[in-house]
Image (cartoon, coloured by chain):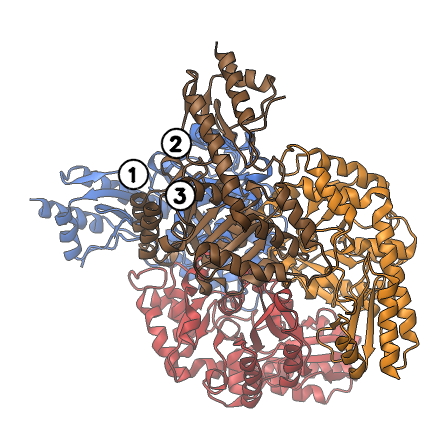
Chain colours: A brown, B blue, C red, D orange
């Protein structure tokens, strides 16, 4: 049976996370986030991000992204994001729901990344129609991007600068933020608030947690009544200590970066192996834990028959996505590559 | 003082419309659409469209478009339209508001018109993401288009066929429907329900009325609870007889087509004149009452100084829109062209 | 044929209003409110209200009320109003639609009026549930009330004081504001901003206009992006000069108060006559142009047979509403009373 | 240190639930609910409810309630519920958010329960205002009720009958459904679909689970596109097996009823003890696991000082809520009562 490269959502939860759940189960605790585990998160995240951070534990990344955007984009506003971002294509209109009908403006950009010049052109085209057009209100960047690439510090800064110039707030969808941090070797602060990011959807679920995400707010003014928005969206978890405990364990001892490091390393090994395969073509630089590769039909078919699991990328005929996770092993990667080489012969 | 080619919204109301308002002012009448003038509209429109039509009088085209889409597109749905359609760019997110957050998918297409092949490609790319993606629910066509072109019967049919194949309902934004009908010499029925259109925003305001639009529903099943939607949007006019009277007068004696015929004819004369001007370039075929023309700066400046009024098209540096109306005169067009020729020398 | 006391929405439009429409039809004018008639409204209303007023012309009262509330009440907020207010019972959830889901809290109160003590009790009961409860955000008063009574200056002030104490903004639904002003003999200023009102839905349609309401904003900070909200609700009238001209003519020469004075006077005469009828019981003080009267079945039936028109009040078996209008005549009232006396014998 | 009677949300998670999480962590599993644990839930719940049930695992009860209502109540609709129901007072407008602005109509009723006669009166008052009023669309019952009472089978049937007669669908908020089932000794089927309930929010979190609720749909037609609604609300849990595993373990071996039985039994013992206390007054029959008691200040204060934890009921001065849980012990209850008796002396 081959390994599962379908998604980092499909692998098991890290033992340290399960241990944390068991540990959090001691005695009673106030509900709805008024417990001590949750209270301590502020300090833990503030340490990691080297600034005061407001932390809002959540069960899903869609909730984190959508609540963030609802805080900074009014119903008559618009959100600029990559045309192929998860936000725009995979959340069934959640941002539109939470913002009460704002408009997402999907921009093109190489490798799943927006570029400052393109953003500037798009924003310069606004402002000529008065009340007839939506108000540009937010920029949302995915880090790592939907296609497994990562934004450098100066790229984030340049995009934020354009956003600021036009009055937009900056949100970062960090469902795979750990993978980006590890990949770049930069501090979390450098990649976020120091580079102009106002709110971060900090993901843990895809990187070893069970169901734990956090919306981090760097600019406290943007957190106004976020609590009521969270509640009315059904995202105020009653026994919140069990979400918070996952986040605490995730940060502890640098686990989040170690786990991401393994995922990235295995993706890198996989990518390297793929470059030696004639009938495989990498579509984007592999900078985090995702690989997009064009494969000849027979190869894909052979891999499936050998039991390997991975997705044909929706809307394409021959592009496949391979995802490595916190627990992907050398053997799994080697086995995949070996199978591929055998099929090619 | 030169003529006003800024918009068909800026010219005066036709005397026959004013007369109708005065005429409707006799005695008392039940409010909120329960008057006899409103009741008679069903028959009048059914005659014109050669089928049973439900008529919903409204004060604005934005309301007509948005109510129509709210009837056929759920909050988790998506509406396919031209990227540059009024719906997508000029209504500050009204469709998103009325549908409670549906997504507009703006497609490219020459001359402001969608093409069936492009629509098919877009729709074939959907359906692979399950609950993660919006449900394609509606197609919206602008007739005449935002760029003054018109869809032929077979084009509408072909687009409707694709829409139907994928389960979408078809809406037509007919803010300038009269201009399209006149231009094509086809019957209203041929251009709408016979070609697969389910709902039509039938415009009168831009073509001589004061404030009167009608949402026409050809498929009665799609009108379910439209009345409550209209009310909760604040679009149930209390003294509705005064909107309905405009619509009745507009249809009477074929006025709507006569007025549109004049607007189209003047646009045609204007376009013909422009083809003789070296420094002017028509961008699209002039098929209704709008002209998009690239002008050298000095020409535009000279025309402005001579008192002519027209819009620089938002987002461009040198493209201008000229709109002719029900009341545009030969002299106004001739004066404009004469000035232009003089400036060119 | 008897007179129509069904609604002030059912009578004819005043000739001065029709004249104004004809007058506004001279030449071209910029659309979407950028015309001079609209521009002048600010000064006209500021004169009438003795302070700087922002004026937003609209076609319906529902739009005025709902836009006002959307400006001051967030989606997670609540609006305090009378349980039987038009806002709460007759707008099919328009305030909920425009606010993206805020909650209306309907309070009881004699004669359709809220009282400060009741409001205080209701507000004191809030604030104990943290993020689990809606945020009290606005108070909405109907002047005249749904039952034809009017708030005195000190009553408005007292209610506003309570609202302010708890952080609420104050909106007044003035669909029949002219009737209230006339009835009380107080200045428009005294009844609004001087007594703590932040926004006023200023009605004209029910008092002689065709379709013209204005949302008046006294606190400019509350008008932020109101223009975009109006547009996305489909309430930006393209040929706005024809709404604005109605409002201008309405204010001119004190017409609005003269018309309301007639309506009130006729209602007063009608009420006086009814007090002499044994089988008729007035339910509320008649302070504006509406009368609520309990009538024995035979009387009501007899009046209907004589051709008089008036509504059985929804949800009751024997309470009827009689509305007098700007154009109600002595003869109409006298005829009604004469018929009633004859039936009683 | 005294026991915690604040909420069943504050106690620990049952060991069997934690075991289930560990058990579910074997190997990889498809994400977003396409795993086998989730797939098996349909059969498990169908067994328990003796009919085919659609199961939608969720992380919060607010999500379950709000999604259910969004399925059966359009934006222009209204939901009838108890004035003091959790739905109406404790979810910060979540139902309004998910339904895109429907109206909750809060009815009074003894002990937190609606009565059929009152519901009928309320519904008979509707339908007279045409498009001006919201459409009555759903009835929502809380079982157990907000005040710890439970509906009998015939009471549910009678309420459902009235609802059906007026075209409403019936939702049950079963955050404490297990407590009600245990209390009544009736089958789950008898208390739901056999008595006319269309959708059930089936709670597990308050009764020993960590974060696991299920929206159960008995009438399959009502589940149309529920998946997209769930996704766009951010409630499609990526690693859903860990929610589903809780639900499976909860049902297994009748644990859910055993745990509820303990909670009920302790509440009953506590209530019995309280009846012997002169300065304590029970407000409602204690039929599930909640007790509402009026206590003299000194008693409450003394209990707090002794370390017992329980809530002053919001909006009251001297009413306290005591909640027993799956794990409440005889000693905890006895200790509380002993302290109370000592204080009374």
Q: Nearer the viewer, residue D239 or D18?
A: D18
Q: Position of residue A106 (x, y in %)?
A: 41, 43
Q: Is residue C231 left or right of residue B165?
A: left
Q: CA distance from mark 1 to mark 2?
A: 47 Å
Question: The disc numbered 2 marks a residue on which chain?
Answer: A
* Vertical placement of residue C106 versus C152, above or below: above
Instruction: Decide which of A241, C141 is in the foreground and name it.
Output: A241
Residue A270 horizontal side relative to residue D284, left or right: left
Chain letter, disc 1 residue:
B
* Residue that appears at 52% across and 70% down: C12
How busy is the neighbourhood of tag 1: few (under 14 within 10 Å), some, or many (20 plus)? Answer: many
Which residue bears the numbered disc 3? A185
Q: Quick check: can you spot residue A210?
A: no
Q: Which residue is mark 1?
A: B286
Task: Give SS at disc 3.
Answer: loop
Q: Are marks 3 and 2 on the same chain?
A: yes
């Amino acid at each position: 049976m081959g390994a599962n490269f379908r998604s980092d959502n499909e692998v098991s939860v890290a033992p340290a996370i399960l241990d944390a759940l068991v540990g959090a189960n001691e005695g009673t605790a106030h509900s709805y986030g008024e417990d001590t585990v949750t209270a301590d998160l502020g300090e833990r995240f503030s340490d990691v991000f080297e600034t005061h951070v407001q932390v809002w534990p959540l069960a899903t990344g869609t909730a984190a992204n959508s609540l963030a955007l609802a805080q900074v984009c009014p119903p008559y506003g618009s959100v600029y994001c990559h045309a192929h971002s998860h936000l725009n294509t995979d959340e069934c209109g959640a941002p539109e729901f939470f913002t009460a009908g704002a408009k997402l403006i999907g921009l093109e950009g190489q490798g799943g990344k927006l570029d400052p010049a393109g953003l500037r052109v798009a924003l310069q085209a606004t402002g000529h129609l008065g009340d007839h057009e939506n108000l540009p209100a937010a920029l949302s960047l995915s880090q790592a991007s939907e296609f497994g690439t990562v934004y450098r510090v100066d790229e984030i800064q340049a995009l934020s600068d354009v956003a600021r110039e036009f009055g937009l707030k900056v949100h970062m969808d960090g469902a795979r933020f750990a993978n980006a941090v590890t990949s770049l070797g930069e501090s979390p602060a450098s990649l976020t608030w120091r580079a102009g990011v106002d709110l971060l959807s900090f993901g843990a679920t895809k990187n070893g947690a069970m169901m734990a995400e956090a919306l981090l707010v760097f600019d406290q003014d943007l957190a106004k009544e976020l609590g009521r928005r969270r509640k009315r969206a059904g995202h105020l978890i009653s026994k919140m200590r069990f979400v918070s405990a996952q986040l605490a364990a995730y940060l502890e001892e640098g686990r989040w970066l170690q786990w991401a490091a393994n995922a990235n390393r295995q993706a890198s090994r996989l990518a390297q192996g793929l470059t030696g395969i004639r009938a495989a073509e990498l579509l984007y630089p592999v900078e985090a834990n995702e690989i997009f590769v064009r494969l000849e039909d027979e190869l894909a078919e052979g891999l499936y028959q050998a039991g390997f699991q991975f997705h044909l990328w929706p809307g394409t005929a021959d592009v496949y996505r391979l995802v490595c996770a916190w627990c992907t092993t050398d053997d799994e990667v080697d086995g995949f590559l070996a199978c591929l080489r055998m099929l090619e012969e």
